[in-house]
Image (tube, rainbow, N blue to C red):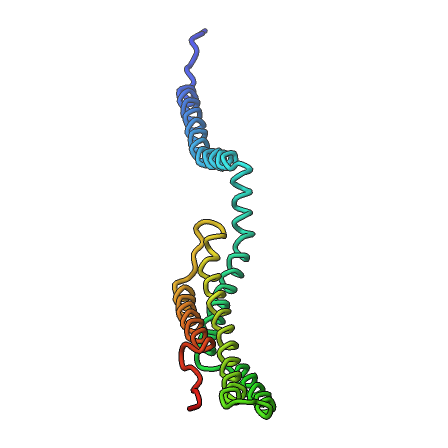
Amino acid sequence: MDTTKTADPTAPEADTAEPQATEAAEAAEAKADLKDAPAAETTETAEATEADLSDEDLEDELHDELDEPEQRSEGVGAAASAVVAAGLGLVALSGSWVSRVIAERQTLVGQIESVNAATTEAKIEALYGDAWHMTALVNGVLSTLALLLAVFVLARPAFGAPGRTLPTWVRAVSWAAVALGALGVLLFGLMYFDILAPLPKAA
């Protein structure tokens, strides 16, 4: 009786299949690790970024967001004030309706008072001088308001938060208002005190 064992022809194939299966599993695990690595790095980066943001940074960002509407409102107010100042200065130099009405009223009062005037100079003063002085006074007040408003607009950023500046056109209009206001104050001041265009005197 032959007791020699016949070799199984499938044995070598089984031995070869096991290393191949192991290598395939290792390759799959390596690919999975490579896929998970960027996601892990992204998560760690996000966590580090959130950790780096302190409470002070968050408060500064919130403060800046809250200041944006305030800055816009201040910009609109400065622009409107500059335009109003320039308009007041121009109206004062060209003659306002208010000054004309007050001058006409003062002329009527002078006509009433001139009846009792003893001298010709007193009559001239009552009929014309007082009305001219009132015109110069009203227009001088308007010029002063224009000057003060323009100076306020130009000086306002210096008292606000650092780094805030006015737009170029707002500064230009404000400086124009300063020039008109200063010219009006000088001109109407000289007229009010009879230095410029004094009242005529009777012969």
Q: Residue at x 40, y 72 (%)?
A: 183
Of residues 83 and 1, the one nearer the viewer is 83
* Number of marks in picture: 0
Q: Residue at x 56, y 83 (%)?
A: 102
Up-down relation of residue 97 to residue 85 (above or below): below
Residue 40 coordinates in the image, percent (x, y) = 48, 33
Of residues 117 and 20, the one nearer the viewer is 117
Quarter of the view holding residue 117 = bottom right
Residue 25 coordinates in the image, percent (x, y) = 45, 28
Q: Residue at x 51, y 40 (%)?
A: 57
Q: Quadrant of the C terminus?
A: bottom left
Q: Residue at x 43, y 60 (%)?
A: 166
Residue 172 coordinates in the image, percent (x, y) = 39, 66
Taking the image as shown, residue 144 lies to the left or right of residue 168, namely right
Of residues 125 and 146, the one nearer the viewer is 125
Up-down relation of residue 8 to residue 145 (above or below): above
Up-down relation of residue 105 to residue 25 (above or below): below
Q: Quadrant of the N terminus?
A: top left
Of residues 142 and 62, the one nearer the viewer is 142
Residue 184 coordinates in the image, percent (x, y) = 43, 74
Taking the image as shown, residue 58 lies to the left or right of residue 30, namely right
Up-down relation of residue 169 to residue 135 (above or below): above
